[in-house]
Image (tube, coloured by chain):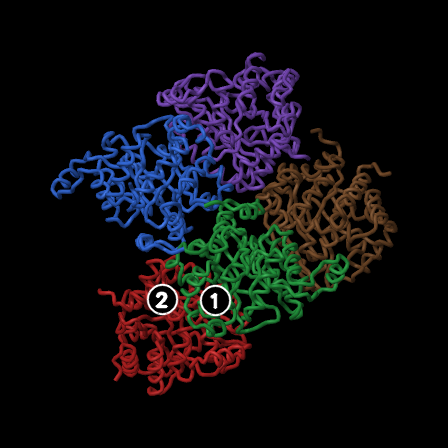
Chain colours: A brown, B green, C red, D blue, E purple
Amino acid sequence: MERSARVSEILSWYGSDSPGTLTNLARILEHGRLAGTGKLLILPVDQGFEHGPARSFAPNPPAYDPHYHFELAIEAGCNAYAAPLGFLEAGAREFAGRIPLILKLNDHDVLADEDDPDQALTGSVADALRLGCAAVGFTIYPGSAHRNAMYGQIREIAEEAKAAGLAVVIWSYARGAALSKEGETAIDVIGYSAQIAAQLGAHIIKVKLPTDHIEQDAARKVYEKAGNSIGTAAERVRHVVQCAFNGRRIVIFSGGGQVEDAPFLEEIRAIQAGGGFGSIIGRNAFQRSKPDALRLLGQVADIYAGNDR
Amino acid sequence: MERSARVSEILSWYGSDSPGTLTNLARILEHGRLAGTGKLLILPVDQGFEHGPARSFAPNPPAYDPHYHFELAIEAGCNAYAAPLGFLEAGAREFAGRIPLILKLNDHDVLADEDDPDQALTGSVADALRLGCAAVGFTIYPGSAHRNAMYGQIREIAEEAKAAGLAVVIWSYARGAALSKEGETAIDVIGYSAQIAAQLGAHIIKVKLPTDHIEQDAARKVYEKAGNSIGTAAERVRHVVQCAFNGRRIVIFSGGGQVEDAPFLEEIRAIQAGGGFGSIIGRNAFQRSKPDALRLLGQVADIYAGNDR
Amino acid sequence: MERSARVSEILSWYGSDSPGTLTNLARILEHGRLAGTGKLLILPVDQGFEHGPARSFAPNPPAYDPHYHFELAIEAGCNAYAAPLGFLEAGAREFAGRIPLILKLNDHDVLADEDDPDQALTGSVADALRLGCAAVGFTIYPGSAHRNAMYGQIREIAEEAKAAGLAVVIWSYARGAALSKEGETAIDVIGYSAQIAAQLGAHIIKVKLPTDHIEQDAARKVYEKAGNSIGTAAERVRHVVQCAFNGRRIVIFSGGGQVEDAPFLEEIRAIQAGGGFGSIIGRNAFQRSKPDALRLLGQVADIYAGNDR
Amino acid sequence: MERSARVSEILSWYGSDSPGTLTNLARILEHGRLAGTGKLLILPVDQGFEHGPARSFAPNPPAYDPHYHFELAIEAGCNAYAAPLGFLEAGAREFAGRIPLILKLNDHDVLADEDDPDQALTGSVADALRLGCAAVGFTIYPGSAHRNAMYGQIREIAEEAKAAGLAVVIWSYARGAALSKEGETAIDVIGYSAQIAAQLGAHIIKVKLPTDHIEQDAARKVYEKAGNSIGTAAERVRHVVQCAFNGRRIVIFSGGGQVEDAPFLEEIRAIQAGGGFGSIIGRNAFQRSKPDALRLLGQVADIYAGNDR
Amino acid sequence: MERSARVSEILSWYGSDSPGTLTNLARILEHGRLAGTGKLLILPVDQGFEHGPARSFAPNPPAYDPHYHFELAIEAGCNAYAAPLGFLEAGAREFAGRIPLILKLNDHDVLADEDDPDQALTGSVADALRLGCAAVGFTIYPGSAHRNAMYGQIREIAEEAKAAGLAVVIWSYARGAALSKEGETAIDVIGYSAQIAAQLGAHIIKVKLPTDHIEQDAARKVYEKAGNSIGTAAERVRHVVQCAFNGRRIVIFSGGGQVEDAPFLEEIRAIQAGGGFGSIIGRNAFQRSKPDALRLLGQVADIYAGNDR
């Protein structure tokens, strides 16, 4: 297989990682419809744990079945499929080698919601190897009172994962009593969250699409003084990518809750325009009928492939 | 022994597990009166620890004796007998090989009741091997402030148990300050609890029989919109099974507190009608005289075997 | 040495234990004046740590000397002598092989008393082997907010001790903010404490002599309904033995604070009448002059040997 | 399942083993056509490694297929199937739980035959757990210059296997430059080989059927003086059982090379008459057509079940 | 990517392996020109170590450069590239993810040739993970006096590799003082070598193409009696595949020394006709100019793909 110049460039940013980790990054970057473009479209399905099964899967009942998501990710031509231990265990043999897998190593439920959320460890690097995964995933909550413990956990896990040649994906979602609800997606907070994940050694960073809200006064002054343009979604995406080592780390954006097609695709175009590396789309994928999901994900892939109509 | 088509189908769901774990699952599925049906009837006796000995055993004093429960489980043709370390240690040599054993690895007493309950580790995977067990059992309390630590413990234990070829049973009982008393058996909460246990990698999941109460507002909207039928017990059982990977994980239901025969058997019929995988019946078994218990468990087995009269 | 039928019967209850552990149990059961009777008289001296030296030893100053207790236990014909690390280290060479030793592995002081007491680890299984002990001892406080951690500790220690062929003695003393002072010796609580220790895998269980107080409402209903006779001390002892696996575990009773001879011996007679396995007597032994102690312990042994006059 | 008195008696001999190991012995003793009789019929297929595939399987080509042997053992109602790692790996998932498995942990090929043969380690206790085995098997060559190293290996493996609750089977085959060819099956050597395996801690011992040759002069004098009757095959079997702790260890006899039915069944009758515990029959089973093998093994089972015609 | 029916069938043979190992087998089976056919074409370059650099690379000097072999394997559309540590370390970053890698974990030089050759451990499973390999490779010499130690090494390495989700390739080359030179490629010896590798747990077995010589007298009798047809190369390939678990393990054949195209391609056609799984071709690939090698390997691939002209 020819290696595209863009994938070579991206891999060149990870000079402290082993060829094993590069191999797994390459497996992700060179799989599916966006193979070789340097763009990523990932299907994540941890919502059964994170939000509960009915809230997640009732809108499209076939999605209660773990095989459904393997099939959806494969048919949509995604680069990878990410899920907690149970969902991967339930299909890893049947779909072995058909799509790169990302094992989410921690999870959080909403049966007891807290001001300062934490996550439970629900998988291990050994599980990821046993299941044939290309990467491990881990959520951190910058802003939570538990964040330092979480950073410490991912540090230890990332060290182990890298020694085993796996890639590390960090879901960096600011939350906690110290932040306003609006602040969770504020441009300064999202940029900061991306930076923290990058400093923690993530190869791929997942954040929410930022708004133009600025949460921290100290940040506001700087933005104003520096004249950062953060007025459009594309500008904000560009700034987040800048915050992740000036583009030397892969930053992808979550698809958020279920929405109408038009505004959703506008977001994708903004990510593309701002130099984002792609999307990780869960609910907007598996909460639709499969034909509808394949249609929408096809449009997303077209945008990232530069074939937008 | 011929392998029934149903047992083969059930085992096929566990493709990420070793032949050793499948062997132990098969030992449970092919033992006792329901052998080969794919249905399970398990005798659990952890109430001496969980509720105290007098509350548990005074209604039927022979039950103070640990040998009684081995005998009851064997005579009733149960698939397995589950208990804490001490009860299994007190009979494992005498009854070696006569019924599959499940060692409960954590327990909780009510000498100091808490809003957010936790469990103590009271056994190990090495104990389970030493005692000849087919599986380990573990309780989690989704909804408790301690749940993340519990999830982390079972993750570690399950990894060790699976490496040793054992099966993993999770008792998933939502409890905690964040939940109303009614919420502990709400349909949304029970479904969520089953999902969490499945995502944590359980092979067999034990939950309580759900009511039609809905605890979480976010879930209520979904149930209403999706038109999920949860009006009858059978419909609710079907939904819980759906929540456990659309039927790809074994879900069994606890027998609850001591009740009259008629309503109890109605519950069993509802579990059977809803596609549940069976029951784990403690107090309604050992708190009766043995002849009465054998009669009742015989009726339960008849229902699950499709011989209901 | 002929093995008495009673000792053979007792050893037969421990079928999950190794011959090494049986050997150490047999060493205890077949030592001293009660050798072969299946009854136990143990001298425990952890009060120097638990209550302070002056409170413990000033009433009989020779007791400040650790050698004193070895001598007292040997001269009184006790089955074993139990103490913390320091006391055993101070005499283990001089008295090597002269009496079975039990190393208490955790201890608690009263310099800072708490509502929910905990214990410190003060010895190890390796210490017990190094000092030639037959058993390790461990205190749990059912009812304390720290109980789950304590259960987890003894689980780990018991696994290690059993692997090394040692016996495990659990001091099960209900205490904590959740219990009334009276509740600590309530019949339901003592029975529950004995059950918990048995479920944790103890070979020998030490509890306090229960009163007829009932602490838990749920238990009261059961006692009333079941018609358990708990009116006399002997009846209560019988119930506690029942709560410890229907007599399949050795349950001994602590001697309590210093009292007059007559009521003290009445308690011994009640333990004997109720089928208890003996006593562990500290303050009523070492807080008297040695001749007086030997006289009293002789009377206790006579009662347990069936030579009561 | 009722436990037969004979199986209970056999299990009672293994008092230093854990309930886990007894459970696995019971699984073997209570499986197949001879379940509960205390007699064993085991199918071993290590000849592909030991003698080469063509010599082993060409006489009955379906036997090249590893599934064939699982099926043969199951259809013949054997108590267990024993094979090296590769053969078990090739069918353990498909046949999980259908027959007790014994993983042979060492093997020897004849591509370079030696005066003093040795074996290679080819599996581990962890493999046995992963594959769901009830026991591990190990060959020793008493008489070989390598025997002490082999004894040391099995000691270490047996310790690990017993801690994991597995049973230990030792193939004790005297060979080596120090022995004459006749001496390999001499009555004194076979008796000695059985004793060594028993002293090494085997639960089940496999030897060849002895002849009336006596290899060692020192032994000859003793046999003559003691007046041991070793004139008939049954008498020799009885003596070998005597050499294995006077009947307190299970001793089974190998079926040897392919022979005619009549002399073969005479050997079985001699084993039965001499109090042997059964046979482990490889080549006389899998080197015939399956119908022929099932017929012959059926006759063997009839003899051991006491239904000989 | 669609999974071909043939690859699904092949993966189904490895039921005792984890999804991780299946994933790596699938990576090899679904890469290159033969992707999905179930046939393999692998480039091995360990001759620099095994025969010395000049003997290996002087015929085509660009082959001194480790990058040359990565490029050759990629351009030829091989399924995988196999080499010792140094060669893989010298290109693993530059070619990360472009072709599945197999790290050879032991090697042998000819600076001191022996009658009974042995190999040195030159890499580890951790190296394989660090370099992004899909499999580890290991050479055994059945027939050598060192074979038992080699079998023991690969046993240990294979256990570790499988736990890490890697595939295991065994080069099974009979050599040693006990074998004649002709015997190294005798049909009985090659079949035996394949069986030993399979019993040791190999996923992919590499042997030499056998001749019709029969080395062992015991085998000759069997072949004659059984009437095995081994007269043609295709018949012999078929027999070797039969010896490797009746086709349930992947067996590939080495390309041998540099030869003319015509006889070489005849061998490939024989492998294809006999149901072999493909070739591992070193010297006949890298000792030619690259265009010539690509032409020849293209012809080989055409034969295996069924496009032979």
Which quadrant would the N terminus of chain C be assigned to in this image? bottom left
Check the image and report above or below for E31 versus B79: above
Tell me the kind of residue under disc 1.
Ala
Is B258 on the left or on the right of C307, as rendered?
right
| Number of marks drawn | 2
Image coords of residue E108 (percent x, y): 47, 26
Image coords of residue B290 (percent x, y): 44, 67
Q: Quadrant of residue D268 in the image?
A: top left
Residue annotated with mark 1: B293
Residue annotated with mark 2: C89
Which quadrant would the C terminus of chain C be assigned to in this image? bottom left
Q: Nearer the viewer, residue D40 or D34?
A: D34
Is B89 on the left or on the right of A294, as rendered?
left
Q: Residue at x 64, y 18 (%)?
A: E290
Q: Residues within 10 Å of mark 1 (few under 14, many from 20)?
A: some
Q: Residue at x 64, y 49 (%)?
A: A87
Q: Nearer the viewer, residue D259 or B127?
A: D259
Is A101 on the left or on the right of B25, as rendered?
right
Taking the image as drawn, is residue D150 in sight? no
Q: Are marks 2 and 1 on the same chain?
A: no
Check the image and report above or below for E87 versus E290: below
Q: Nearer the viewer, residue E3 or C170?
A: E3
Taking the image as drawn, is residue C296 in sight? yes
Q: Residue at x 74, y 56 (%)?
A: A174
Q: Secondary structure at mark 1?
A: helix
Tell me the kind of residue under disc 2.
Glu
Could you tell me how far apart the alpha carbons at marks 2 and 1 are, in whole angstroms? 54 Å
Check the image and report above or below for E129 versus E87: below
Image coords of residue D146 (percent x, y): 31, 35
